[in-house]
Image: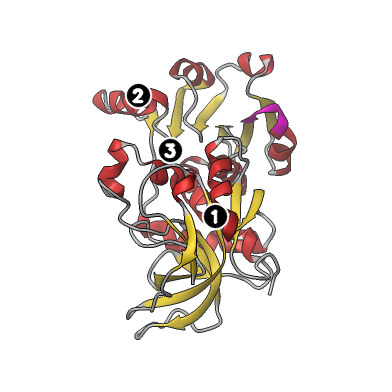
Amino acid sequence: MKAALITRYGSPDVIRVTEVPKPTPEPGEVLVRVHAASVNRTDCGELAAPLIGRLFYGFWRPRRSIFGMDVAGVVEQVGTGVTRFRVGDRLFGMCPSRRNGAQAEYVCIPESGPITTLPASIPFDQAVLCEGAFYASATMTKLAIPGTHILVYGASGAIGSAAVQLAKVRGAEVTAAVEARHLDLARSLGADHVVDCASGEFARLGRRFDIVYDSVGKMPIRQWRRLLKPDGIFATTDRGPWSQNLLAWLGALAVRSKRVMVPLPRRSSVPQFLAELRDWMAAGRYRAVIDRTYRLDQIADAYRYVETGKKAGIVVILVAEGQGEAA
């Protein structure tokens, strides 16, 4: 099979699309014919692997040689003992982070992993959106309740665009802060209010938000503090430049304050979340935001684009023929 092979850390130039052995499912696993995958910030971070990251990814070289968390495809073979899926099932979800991923023609995934069936009405390329949505869900499931006013900063990225939609389906009022070129996108996601994050309008916003959610880790502490109500909460999934968000969180812990949160989703919440996400997508209440689409043999270019930090939503890798069409 063809795969985007990565055997050492570095720039996208180290990625080789080449033939590798096709995996065989172990007991309890399904072999998925990948139709679509994605390239995201997590993949780029794993490729570059700063020193602290190598504690997780492998010190001298990557522990896994094929990256890619988001996956959408068709079950081609099942291992012994598999009961959740059958050959021919369409599915989507995420590959486990410590195993080879979906940037290949085939991938094996435990049937108990973060995957579920995909309705025939949803094209494969519209379904490789789970990682961003999953990270955003940790905050929105807990804090996005009717009557809550949430500011989503960086609402055009994979996590931010997911946060806007998840907050809306849960009944919150949402203000989306984005670059000027993404104002229409933020409106299309259902945000109640949209503001250019570089404008005077944004600079004049006062203490009006119950939640400030920084989806990209770029807000200075003084900025989110002036936007929160006295009992408001700042939440983020990124430690930020110089790790200022991590330091703010540790400081809040030290004084037993709940004003700063770095929420991470619980793995036990995956099955319920994927089922909800699937139903929202089928009902038209949640959609993928696709920035660019590349073929598997163009994947190095996809990495280079994601590294620019300019993407909106997700960058899709088309792996199989017809992957952009509903079955």
Vertical comparison of 65 with 9: above or below: below
Q: Which residue is mark 3?
A: 237
Label 1 close to label 3 by CB (< 8 Å)? no
The Cα–Cα distance between marks 3 and 2, rounded to whole angstroms, is 13 Å
Q: Which residue is mark 1?
A: 38
Q: Secondary structure at mark 2?
A: helix
> Are there few (<14), some (14-19), or many (20+) residues within 10 Å of tag 3?
many
Q: Position of residue 45 (x, y in %)?
A: 42, 42
Question: Of marks 1 and 3, which one's residue comes earlier in the chain?
Answer: 1
Tag count: 3
Vertical comparison of 115 with 228: above or below: below
Residue 248 marker: 2
Residue 54 position by quadrant: top left
1 or 2: mark nearer the eye: 1
Question: Of marks 1 and 2, which one's residue comes earlier in the chain?
Answer: 1
What residue is drawn where x is 52% and y is 38%? 307
Which amino acid type is shown beneath numbered disc 3? Thr
Vertical comparison of 321 with 99: above or below: below
What residue is drawn where x is 48% and y is 51%? 134
